[in-house]
Amino acid sequence: MKKVKYAIIGAGTAGLTAKREISRETDDYILINSGPLGTTCARVGCMPSKVFIQVANDFHRRKVFEQIGIDGADALKVDTQKVMKHTRKLRDSFTNPIINSMEKMGDQLIQKKARFIDDHTLDLGDDKIRAEKIIIATGSTPVVPKEWKEKFGEQIVTTDELFELKELPQKIAVVGLGVIGLEMGQALARLGLDVIGFSANPTLGGAQDKDIQKHIQKELSKEMTIVSARAKPVRRDSDGRIVVESEGQEYAVDLVLSSMGRRPNLESLGLKEIGIEHDEKDLPLFDHQSLQIKGHPHLLLAGDVNQMRPILHEASDQGFIAAQVAMDPTKCFQMRTPLAMTFSSPQIAQAGQTSSELKNKGIEFIEGEVSFKDQGRAKAMVKNSGLLKVYVHAKTGELLGTEMACPSAEHLSHLLSWAIQQKLDVFTLLKMPFYHPVLEEGLRTALRNASKKVPSPHRPMDLSECPDPSAGS
Ligand SMILES: Cc1cc2nc3c(=O)[nH]c(=O)nc-3n(C[C@H](O)[C@H](O)[C@H](O)COP(=O)(O)OP(=O)(O)OC[C@H]3O[C@@H](n4cnc5c(N)ncnc54)[C@H](O)[C@@H]3O)c2cc1C
């Protein structure tokens, strides 16, 4: 049996970041990975999905050409075989450097499935490893309920298989319209497929605010059929199509994209069998700051596997924290301000605390909002649709959170997450520069809207006053 100081299970973003940190201090570690190398993000997640969405958005743009005076849009066609090839080509350009660097790891990389024998020992099938500290960074897997798989076999795919398709079918059902389902469903529709999306939940694309949910529902319904109810698998029909049923209506499609959530890769690790206490969601009990498993501080849980914030930069941060805490348990790190987004059109984003989180905590806040319908730059871009809300502390005006579904939400939400992390208030933010004409002027309207509702002893000034007016200039 091999003995090491540190074992990391999972060579995804969290595991590789942990490996990077540990390797700066010692060579006494091992990285164990059972699935394909290259990380979920680069292989089947963030990166290929964004390449695919970019192509879809580029093609969709033709729909405004006539309105703005460009003729010939009708002649544009999509070759789905080429789109899929392009997606895979760029995907490979993201995964290959990761795989190449890992192949240089020699016997510090073990490509096997790990299972706990006890809380220091891992069974690798034909081998065993004993480690002082173990970082579990095994990620998550898309859920495909058994009933669906049994009925539809190869005709139900997840994002693990979608990008491997050689070409795209005519008609597709997307079951589940959370972040992944909404992104992919809209992109498929924009490439010309007949898409029917099913969601029993109003939180399309992860949106929390009710007005924003309504806005997204309205906008997305222009491009794809959205059925706001659960879907059930029914049968395969005589033409080889598969039939999905919802609220008494049947839909025959060529393929189902299952985006019904992802479950953490925990089962095969055998943590319950070695006596690790789990919560009602079947997750090991762990400390959300140190990432240490309760009662077993030498075991740490990082990345999607812990379900805290299943997005890339969080997986990376958690890999960092897990490694640092494994090396020195007295270390403590603060998480960044939450920032999440959905690459739909309009883009959806949240930063800081959502309105429901603020309500649940009993924090008094007020909302400032802006519609992008009449926003100058958005009109010039022919993207003038969207809603942005800021949540500010009712007494101090501190920016606490934001949610939006609007053009360039990816950039606006970044700006606001930085301001939230810096604990800036609306009055300070309004004194920042705003160029003209830009979408940020829309954001300024929302901030002004909020600032008027915050009680202030003086009328807030547009600009900061000089620290010492008598000094002049
Ligand atoms: C379609 C899609 C789009 C996404 N888009 C975005 C986006 O735009 N932005 C964003 O921030 N996030 C996005 N994400 C989420 C992001 O990809 C994940 O948060 C991130 O990849 C998680 O990294 P990880 O290290 O936790 O897990 P992973 O990268 O999944 O790594 C886990 C590794 O552990 C291995 N493993 C599992 N069990 C064992 C075992 N028993 N023994 C050994 N090895 C094991 C697996 O094979 C895998 O290699 C997207 C995800 C998907 C699916």
Image (spheres, rainbow, N blue to C red):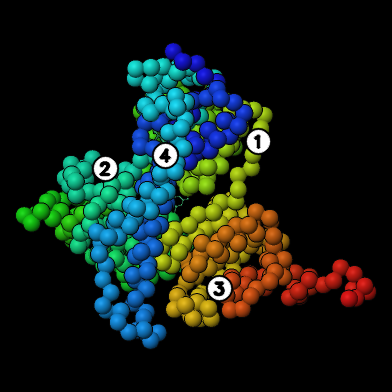
Q: Is residue 332 above or below residue 116?
A: below
Give neighbour class at mark 4: few <14, some 14-19, many 20+ (Cα, 10 Å).
some
Q: Nearer the viewer, mark 4 or mark 2?
A: 4
Q: What's under tag 4, amino acid-wise?
A: Ile
Q: Earlier in the sequence, mark 4 or mark 1?
A: 4
Q: Nearer the viewer, mark 2 or mark 1?
A: 1
Q: For mark 2, what is the residue?
A: 145
- Front position among marks 4 and 1: 4
Q: Is residue 237 left or right of residue 106?
A: left
Is there a contact, CB below 8 Å, between mark 2 and mark 3? Answer: no
Residue 116, placed above or below residue 237: above
- Label 4 residue SS: helix
* Alpha carbons under labels 4 and 1: distance apart: 31 Å
Q: Amino acid at mark 1?
A: Cys
Q: Position of residue 144 (x, y in %)?
A: 28, 43
Q: Nearer the viewer, residue 203 or 140?
A: 140
